[in-house]
Amino acid sequence: MNAQVIELSHAAPGRLALLGTGTVGTAFVVRYQALQARGLALPPFRWLANSRAVLACDGAPERPLHEIQRAPRLTAAATAWKQADSLHAGDVVVDATGSESVAAEHAGWLARGVHVVTANKLGLGAQQQRAAQIAANCADSGARYGDSATVGAGLPLLSSLRALVEGGDRIHRIEGVLSGSLAWLFHRYDGSQPFSVAVREALAAGFTEPDPRLDLCGEDVRRKLLILARACGLAVDDGQVNIDSLVPAALAALPPEQALAQLAQLDEAVQQRWRRAHMAGQVLRFIGSVQPGAARVGLQSLAADHPLASGAGTDNRVAIHSDRYRDQPLLIQGPGAGADVTAAALLDDVLRIARNGRTGRR
């Protein structure tokens, strides 16, 4: 495929644009094509793009995605997200990236009436000002913001919180295992081998980011906590989240290639914490918790019968404490990582927007 940006023609409102053709974006296209083959009515594609090129479509992607994935990178002046300027009110942008530059455009697209569906946590999980602008622009333009894929890979977390609040419930505290990669690591780690061995296994299995420090530092969980808090009106600023990173300062300072070779720096501290927990009959879980004015992210030692202690694999497990669920929290559990479930959550939001548009609901 030619590395240049393809000329995009104007199209009727209600078309789809995908930003990001990595594992999640590719899974989105595969699921789209499968549902289309089953006869499900889907918004037609207008284009899909990554940092290398923009591929125009007429209904559905026909060219293999590897063509756009292997194209030379675009110049900074022609970054793919700028092509969203060609979209009209009623169109849908699907953000399958983790890009700050793309997240910074969400509010502007919404102001123009372009719907946004996203797995990118840097929209509602970043600065409070950005989150507030997204909400305000949705209210002003009637555009919708589909964020089901940002927390729990589509588990009914955000929808449940919003439904509780809309029904008059008050949320007191949310706590949970919110990282699929860290869930897997602490279900896997049993003290019989160095923690860094488990990290390398998780990396090889695709459970962590290519640089596993991005998971181990707790930043991903911090963003998810902010999204959950903002979904139910808990007053927490982005600077109020206290993070207990698993990554020692010396390891955090290394370039990615050197850091991968020095993962053994993780081992002693984790082993000591595991040993103390084991001797007390407890387990280690990496927990995020938020309540009005305070939030915390870090490794905790939990009793074996604690609501967050069970689960398996990459499962997320979240406890919601509220007026309604005061004595026993509402528990939501399920796969919290994986391209397929994340892509399904994105497409669910797209279909929800399309249905609401046809019925005139917002």
Image (cartoon, grey):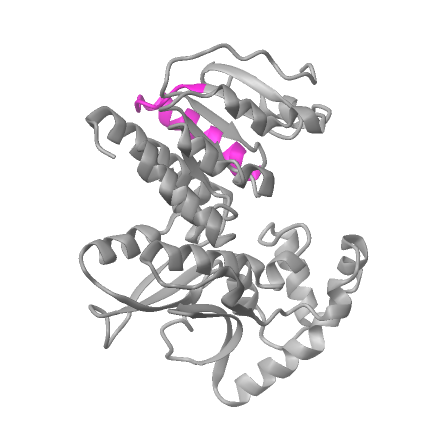
Q: Which image quadrant for residue 174? A: bottom left
Please determine whether, in this image, residue 269 is positioned above or below residue 196: below
Question: Magenta: predominant secondary structure element?
Answer: helix
On screen, 109 above or below 128? Answer: above
Q: Residue at x 53, y 41 (%)?
A: 103
Q: Measured from the top left, where is residue 189 in percent x and y? A: 58, 71
Q: Residue furthest left?
A: 167
Above or below: residue 254 compared with residue 299: above
The quarter of the picture where the C terminus appears is top left
Reply yes or no: does residue 163 show up in magenta.
no
Q: Residue at x 40, y 19 (%)?
A: 44
- Looking at the image, residue 41 sits to the left or right of residue 235; the answer is left
**Residues shaded magenta:** 23-45
Quick one: 237 or 90, which is closer to the camera?
237
Q: Is residue 336 left or right of residue 201?
A: left
Residue in the image at 30% along x and 50% along y: 159
In this view of the protein, can residue 334 be seen by the observer?
no
User: What is the tally of numbered marks visible in this picture?
Assistant: 0
| Left or right of 145, for residue 17 | right
The percent position of residue 266, horizontal first and vertical second, equals 70, 71
Magenta residue check for 42: yes
Asked whether residue 44 appears in the rendered view, the answer is yes
Is 182 on the left-hand or right-hand side of 343?
A: right
Horizontal and vertical percent for residue 186?
54, 69
Given residues 77 and 257, the one toward you in this image is 77
Q: Position of residue 206 (x, y in %)?
A: 60, 50
Is 290 located above or below residue 116 in the figure? below
The N terminus - image quarter: top right
